[in-house]
Amino acid sequence: MMSTQTNACTELVRFWLEARHGCLIGEGVPVPVPYALSDIDLVAYQPEGKRLVVPGDVTLGPRVIVEAKDEHDWEPLGREFGKLLRADVAMMGDGVFVPRGAKGVKFSMLREEHFDRASTFFGTHDFDRLFVVHAIDVAVITGLATQLAARRIYWLTIPDVVRDLVSWYRTHDRPAALRNTLVGDMFHLLVGFCGLNLSDDTISRAAK
């Protein structure tokens, strides 16, 4: 069944979490914020309690909330995203989220409102926050990675996810089983049947 999401980034991340990591997924969890209604893009839970090993040797889960943000037509290199992330982190101060009611937050899942909604959803504060974006200034992430990881906040790019999916697909014992979802079927058709071969170098250059 096709999901209600239409964003390619979100759908690819959903497939990655469901098929690659065996997660159960909820989507579009509503989050009231001042003068608007926001949401959490994806809420993921690994039902066997397994941790998710993701690119960069980062271990997450088994509870994860995900914000997938793809604005590659607006700013393909992720430099503006880097500036906006620095501004959001500055609003966090020494806390684990941007305080309730703050304005001008670009990455909405950093808000206190979203943290509280996820805590209610899971029934615990024991979860990670994962952002998947089209690109982001490497210098910004390098400088903030340790600080953010201490708050259980992590970042990946779509090229990271694609590299991981291609590597996993090549060792899959029954890739035709992926055809029960639209994204899985497209992936199997392109990579399996058509022989699309995306090397790490190709993916990296395409993202620049």
Image (spheres, helix red, strand yellow):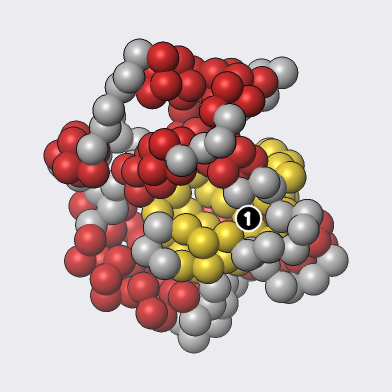
In this rendering, position of residue 96 left or right of residue 35: left
Q: Check disc 1 and give the amino acid type.
A: Ile
- Give the secondary structure at mark 1: strand
> Does residue 71 lie above or below 57 as drawn?
above
Residue at image x 49%, y 85%? 94
Kindly tell me whether residue 102 is visible in this rendering: no
The one nearer the camera, 45 or 67, is 45
Kindly tell me whether residue 119 is visible in this rendering: yes
Q: Residue 168: x, y in percent?
A: 46, 43
Q: Residue 122: x, y in percent?
A: 80, 61
Which residue is situated farthest in the front direction here?
A: 173
Residue at image x 64%, y 58%? 64
Q: Quadrant of residue 84?
A: bottom left
> Does residue 159 lie above or below 187 as drawn?
below
Q: Residue 147: x, y in percent?
A: 41, 80
The one nearer the camera, 128 or 115, is 128
Q: Residues within 10 Å of mark 1 (few under 14, many from 20)?
A: many
